[in-house]
Image (cartoon, rainbow, N blue to C red):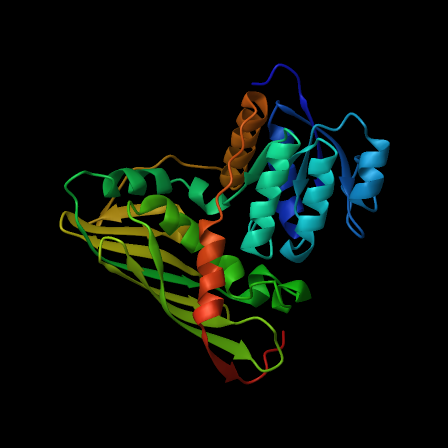
Amino acid sequence: MVDSKIKLAIVGVGKIVKDQHHPSIIKNPDYELVATASRNGFLDGIESFKSIESLLANRKDLDAVSLCMPPQYRFTAAKFALEHGVDVLLEKPPGATVCEVNQLEKLAVMNDCQLYTTWHSRHAPAVANAKRFLSQPQLKIEEVLINWKEDVRKWHPNQEWIWQAGGLGVFDPGINGLSILTHILPASFFVETSILKFPENRAAPIAANLSFTSEDGYRIIGEFDWGISGGEEWNIEVITDQGKLILSSGGAKLAIDGEPQEVEQYSEHGEYESIYREFSSLVSNRKSNVDVSPLALVADAFLLGERIILESFDE
C-alpha cells in the first residue's frame, strides 16, 4: 500500500477497459480513478476528456495514466505523459514497434518517471508454478509446443484497428502465449522460420506457423490461428527429461505428466488485479518494469515471414 492514493486516469476507453481495467482499479485501494480520455468511450461517473492533451491540461494533480488505446497510437500519448512527469502503464502490446518502447524507456529515465509494460498472461494462476518447475537446476528441456488459437469474431468483433498495419492481427492474442514462454523458459530463444497467412483484404495475418531455436538447443514450434470457430486453444506443452508440462487455458491450468497441479484460483479479473498491484509497487518504489522480448519475437516473425495470401476474411 502506498502512502497516498495514486491519482490515475485511463486513456482509451474500449472493451478491455470496461471488462478488465476498470473493475481491477476500483477494487484496489491504492488508486483513485479520477478521469478518462477517449475520443468515443467514457465511464459513468468519471470525469472524461477527448484527448490526453486536454486531460493533462486540466488535471494537474494526476500521478499516472493507464494507456489502453490501440498500439499504433500509444507512443505519442506515452511520450506526452512522460514529458509531463506522469508515470505510465502500457496495455499489451506496449507499442507498435520495439524502437518506440525503447525510446519511451529512455524518456522515462530522463523525466524521472516510471514505465510499466504489462503482459497480463504472465499473471495467470499457473504461470508461476510452471516457471518454478522449469527452473530446476538439473532439468533438461527437449521440445516446446505452443498452440494459441481463438475466434476473432468472439474476442475482437468489429475492431478494425487490429487488421491494420501495426495492429498485429493473430499476434494480438498470440503475443500472450509468447509473453508466457519468454517468462517461464530458462533460456532465451529466437525465431528460426515464419509462415504468415494474410487474408487478401487485410494488412495483418490471421494465422502463423513459427519455429524457434533456444540457446540451449531445443526447438519450439508455434501454431497461431485467429480464424477457428468453437472453443479456444491456449496451450503450451514443454517436454522435459523430468516429465511433460502442459500449461493450458491461457496459463490458468497446469498438469505434469497428466497430473493436475494445484494453483492459486483467481477471479475473472485476477490477471489485471495483479498488474495493478505491481504497478502500485513500481510507483511507490520509483522503479520501472520494461520488457519488449515478446514484441521483439513478433517483429522478427514479420521480418522473416514467408507470406501466404488467403481468400478474403470478413466478419
**Is 125 situated left or right of 72 in this image?**
left
Examine the image and state in which quarter residue 261 appears.
Answer: top left
Residue 230: tell me if it is visible: no
Residue at point 46%, 74% (across, down): 196
Examine the image and state in which quarter residue 116 appears.
Answer: top right
User: Does residue 224 lie above or below 8 as drawn?
Assistant: below
Residue 14: percent from the left, percent from the top? Answer: 69, 51
Examine the image and state in which quarter residue 239 appears.
Answer: bottom left
Residue at point 56%, 18% (across, down): 1
Instruction: Pick whichever, 282 or 299, lies toward us.
Output: 299
Residue 300: percent from the left, percent from the top? Answer: 45, 63
**Is 108 situated left or right of 196 in this image?**
right
Residue at point 49%, 48% (across, down): 292
Residue 88: tell me if it is visible: yes
Name of the residue lying farthest toward the bottom: 311
**Is 165 situated left or right of 58 in this image?**
left
Residue 65: percent from the left, percent from the top? Answer: 69, 36
Residue at point 78%, 39% (across, down): 44
Residue 123: percent from the left, percent from the top? Answer: 45, 40
User: Does residue 56 lie above or below 208 as drawn?
Assistant: above
Name of the residue lying farthest toward the top: 3
Q: Quadrant of the C terminus?
A: bottom right
User: Does residue 113 lie above or below 138 as drawn?
Assistant: above
